[in-house]
Image (cartoon, rainbow, N blue to C red):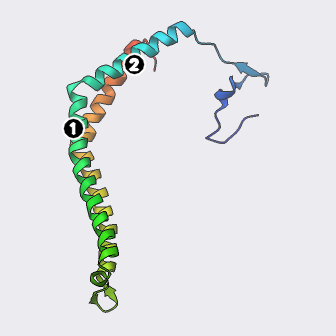
Amino acid sequence: MRYEDPWYDALASGWGELGGAGAPVPLPVAQPGRARQEEAAAADVYLQVQRSAAFQEVRGRYRRFVVPASIAFFGWYVGYVVTATTAPGLMARPVAGAVNVAMIAGLGQFLTTFLLTWAYARHARLRRDRAALELRWDTQELTRGIRGGAS
């Protein structure tokens, strides 16, 4: 029986596609010794890439944006919660009609979430994506060389 479900993994059961006669065709069994050697060599490639200056630069760019942005946003959130609980009179102060300081600050939380998401995506696109893609291609080329051109 062939499933049209894209999440169904037919190869997980140990059998491949149906043969011409309608019977399942067993998958070829991989050689365990060779697979372990390839896995060890691939692990060495990833460790080599992780230790490279290019990878460290990409990680550094990521951390230089994410750490300060996370601290600032968390501080803004905690400040909002603390102010709401310790100074209800301030938060209840009307700004315009029925709109008070708490409503403005609450909407500001949503606004800063969207702004931070936009800033993160822009930072990634301008400062990390190209370098990360180059690392990815280099890593794939190195692992492809280990596996003899097949990946």
Query: Label 2 is placed on what type of residue?
Result: Ala
Helix, strand, or loop for circle 2? helix
Residue 71 position within the rendered picture, expressed as x and y whole percent measured from the top left: 25, 54
Report the residue marked by disc 2.
Answer: 43
At label 1, counting other C-alpha atoms closer than 10 Å, the crowd grade (few under 14, some 14-19, many 20 or more) is few
Q: Is residue 16 visible?
A: no
**Image marks 2 and 1: residues in contact by CB distance under 8 Å:** no
Q: Quadrant of the C terminus?
A: top left
**What residue sits 63% from the left and 13% below the top?**
29
At label 2, counting other C-alpha atoms closer than 10 Å, the crowd grade (few under 14, some 14-19, many 20 or more) is few
> On screen, 117 above or below 16?
below
> On screen, 81 above or below 117?
below
Q: Is residue 45 left or right of residue 67?
A: right
**What residue sits 64% from the left and 14% below the top?**
28
Label 2, label 1: how far apart the Cα atoms are: 22 Å
**What residue sits 21% from the left and 37% below the top?**
60
Helix, strand, or loop for circle 1? helix
Q: Quadrant of the N terminus?
A: top right
Q: Earlier in the sequence, mark 2 or mark 1?
A: 2
> On screen, 5 above or below 55?
below
Q: Nearer the viewer, residue 96 or 27?
A: 96
Residue 57 position within the rendered picture, expressed as x and y whole percent measured from the top left: 20, 33
Report the residue marked by disc 1.
Answer: 60
The number of callouts visible is 2
